[in-house]
Amino acid sequence: MRENFLTMASEKIGTKELAKQLGISRQRVNQLARLGKLTRGSDGKWDADRAKTELDRTLDSQQERRAKVESGKRKVESGKGFHSQAKDGEMDGIPMSGSTHDIFNRARAAKEIAIAKERQLDLRRRQGELLEASEVEQAWTRKLTSFKNRLLGIPDKIASRLAVCSDVLECRALLDGELRVVLNTLSENETDAA
């Protein structure tokens, strides 16, 4: 009587129906049965509740092992420069949880966003709103080198005139005038000089 009660409580279904309930193909159901991850009843039918429990138990333990292996691979690869790992459960800023389809869609969306940002930067560069860092560095190097050379040239330029000055105010005015000329060249734009 107890056995009849148990069989009545759990529904016995065919492979096609079980596959539909589990969200997998019939071939996958049969494959999992061959691997010993699902158990078919003696009558050849499936106990749906038992199959779900078995599938959850076996796949969860496999997923945990796979996640540990993948996590280790990501840590190793991040040291070699393959990608950056923002935090646990993420790769290149993309959450690695959910179904494969969800992860793929998030990765594709992240790729599209990156392409859009790159195109936007390229457009701003072509419109003259952005400059290459190397060009800015070269311009500043030229400007500061020119300023340094002009500043260091002041003693040679005014030494003979300072030597004959007898008035302190005249010496001061001469130095002040030359320093102002050099400082004004620093504030000129490249286009003004051209």
Image (cartoon, rainbow, N blue to C red):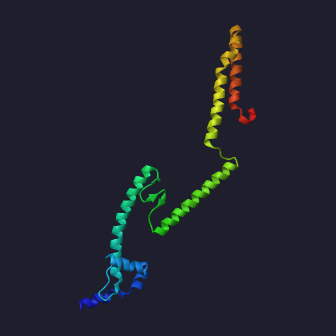
Residue 148 or 187: which is nearer the viewer?
A: 148
Name which residue lies at 69% across and 19% down.
176
Locate the N terminus and report the quarter of the image it occupies.
Answer: bottom left
Asked which quadrant contains residue 178, the reply is: top right
Q: In the rendering, at what x and y percent does residue 37 appear?
A: 33, 75
Q: Is residue 38 left or right of residue 187?
A: left
Name which residue lies at 25% across and 89% down.
3
Q: In the rendering, at what x and y percent does residue 107 appear?
A: 51, 62
Q: Is residue 187 left or right of residue 55?
A: right
Q: In the rendering, at what x and y percent does residue 124 appear?
A: 67, 50
Name which residue lies at 35% across and 75% down.
55
Q: In the rendering, at what x and y percent does residue 72 appear?
A: 38, 56
Q: Is residue 42 left or right of residue 103?
A: left
Name which residue lies at 57% across and 57% down.
114
Q: Check the image and report above or below for 194 versus 162.
A: below
One can see residue 62 in this view: yes
Asked which quadrant contains residue 65, the reply is: bottom left
Q: Is residue 113 left or right of residue 41?
A: right
Q: Check the image and report above or below for 86 versus 57.
A: above
Q: Check the image and report above or below for 57 versus 94.
A: below
Locate the C terminus and report the quarter of the image it occupies.
Answer: top right
One can see residue 166 in this view: no
Across the whole image, how many numbered discs are drawn on residues? Answer: 0
Asked which quadrant contains residue 112, the reply is: bottom right
